[in-house]
């Protein structure tokens, strides 16, 4: 079930402190009990992992008269360096030059109790700037967890407490928590205040191709590694693993002919693939049992990953300490002792061969 908050054409009554939280169409109590609270809960009867959709789906617009106009300093991005969906939003902030217009806060890498009243484990903020390098307290709302932000935006919210969260400081609500839509906003709606407005990662002449790539890469690779890792039966795991390696083989073939997925310029499809590839050998090969073939065994994919990592600003979005601590420390059903593997500690700043293609 998807619930929507009003779009940019919904009129706000001036003079009243109208909270958008009451405008949400929320699920019934019975439905709420059945909804997942984290990705670990999203299992079908067959033992397969099935990801549920995001719930906050409003848009920031360059139209100054919209409910959510593109303004410098108005919005805040809540992320986890560990989460690939959040990391692609962070990548857009950096490469589009929006990091001065939209600030961000990263949570701590390992899930903790989000409330004393129940057992939910999820994303929490650091208590101080020094508790966990890279993580920080929530200086915008004083929240202790991402869950608290959802409950601030909607008093009766029932569902997952995920990152990324794009927050409106003025209206004190969540604008959007769907990474695909957030990166599209960052790509176009803030160009008047972006430092790199000419970079278009979703150009009109390539949108059909990008959408096609996104479809099978998401199913087979981005979400495919999770379908492998969270599967609770052999059959669903083997099916997901086969789809994963079919998709990786297909990417390897494409990248043997051109520098990037759509040709010789970086697009949205590359950023979306990158966030999974950068985690592959360090996490997914071990933790999610994606061990048939390592990224390092794919010459084109491995060098392609290094190429993208070396784009100015991209390396700052990859915090491997957070990534490894989260996966190995937050899924006790998969790794009950929370042991973090020693390696492989790959040097993604080492030379690559992708410049053999035209830039």
Image (cartoon, helix red, strand yellow):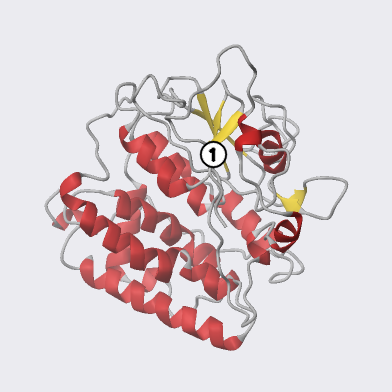
**Residue 270: quarter of image:** bottom left
In front of the other: 218 or 55: 55
Question: What is the quadrant of the N terminus in the image?
Answer: bottom right
Q: Tag 1: Cα neighbours inside 10 Å, few (<14), some, or many (≥20)?
A: many
Q: Please, which residue is most extreme toward the left here?
A: 358
User: Which residue is depicted at the point 70% across and 32% down?
Assistant: 130
| Observer able to see residue 260 | no
Secondary structure at numbered mark 1: loop
In front of the other: 189 or 96: 189
User: Which residue is depicted at the point 33% across and 34% down?
Assistant: 96
The spot of residue 285 in percent (x, y) is: 52, 72
Q: Is residue 234 above or below residue 137?
A: below
In front of the other: 309 or 222: 222
User: Which residue is depicted at the point 63% across and 72% down?
Assistant: 43
Q: Is residue 202 above or below residue 71?
A: below
Is 17 on the left-hand or right-hand side of 113? left
Is 154 on the left-hand or right-hand side of 241? right
The spot of residue 193 in percent (x, y) is: 34, 21
Q: Please, which residue is most extreme toward the bottom here?
A: 235
Q: Please, which residue is most extreme toward the right here?
A: 117
The spot of residue 290 in percent (x, y) is: 50, 75
Is 152 on the left-hand or right-hand side of 6? right
Total numbered circles: 1
Q: Which residue is identified by label 1?
A: 5
| Observer able to see residue 285 | yes
The spot of residue 188 in percent (x, y) is: 30, 34
Q: Is residue 259 above or below residue 247?
A: above
In front of the other: 104 or 73: 73
């Amino acid at each position: 079930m998807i619930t929507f908050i009003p779009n940019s054409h919904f009129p706000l009554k001036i003079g009243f402190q109208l909270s958008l939280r009451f405008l949400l169409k929320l699920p019934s109590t019975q439905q709420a009990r059945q909804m997942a609270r984290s990705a670990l809960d999203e299992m079908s009867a067959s033992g397969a992992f099935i990801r549920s959709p995001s719930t906050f789906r409003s848009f920031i617009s360059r139209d100054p008269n919209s409910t959510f106009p593109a303004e410098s300093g108005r919005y805040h991005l809540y992320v986890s360096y560990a989460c690939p969906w959040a990391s692609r939003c962070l990548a857009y902030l950096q490469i589009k030059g929006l990091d001065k217009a939209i600030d961000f806060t990263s949570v701590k890498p390992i899930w903790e109790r989000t409330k004393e009243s129940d057992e939910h484990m999820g994303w929490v903020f650091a208590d101080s700037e020094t508790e966990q390098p890279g993580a920080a307290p929530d200086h915008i709302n004083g929240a202790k967890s991402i869950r608290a932000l959802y409950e601030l935006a909607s008093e009766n919210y029932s569902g997952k407490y995920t990152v990324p969260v794009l927050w409106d400081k003025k209206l004190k609500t969540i604008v959007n928590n769907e990474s695909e839509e957030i990166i599209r906003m960052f790509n176009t709606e803030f160009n008047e205040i972006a430092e790199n407005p000419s970079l278009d990662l979703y150009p009109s002449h390539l949108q059909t191709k990008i959408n096609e790539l996104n479809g099978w890469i998401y199913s087979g690779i981005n979400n495919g590694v999770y379908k492998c890792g969270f599967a609770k039966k052999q059959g669903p795991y083997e099916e997901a693993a086969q789809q994963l390696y079919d998709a990786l083989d297909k990417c390897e073939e494409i990248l043997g002919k051109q520098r990037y997925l759509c040709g010789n310029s970086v697009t949205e499809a590359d950023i979306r693939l990158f966030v999974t590839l950068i985690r592959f050998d360090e996490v997914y090969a071990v933790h999610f049992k994606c061990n048939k073939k390592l990224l390092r065994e794919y010459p084109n994919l491995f060098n392609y990953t290094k190429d993208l990592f070396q784009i100015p600003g991209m390396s700052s979005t990859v915090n491997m300490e957070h990534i490894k601590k989260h996966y190995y420390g937050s899924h006790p059903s998969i790794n009950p002792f929370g042991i973090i593997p020693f390696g492989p500690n790959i040097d993604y700043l080492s030379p690559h061969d992708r410049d053999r293609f035209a830039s």
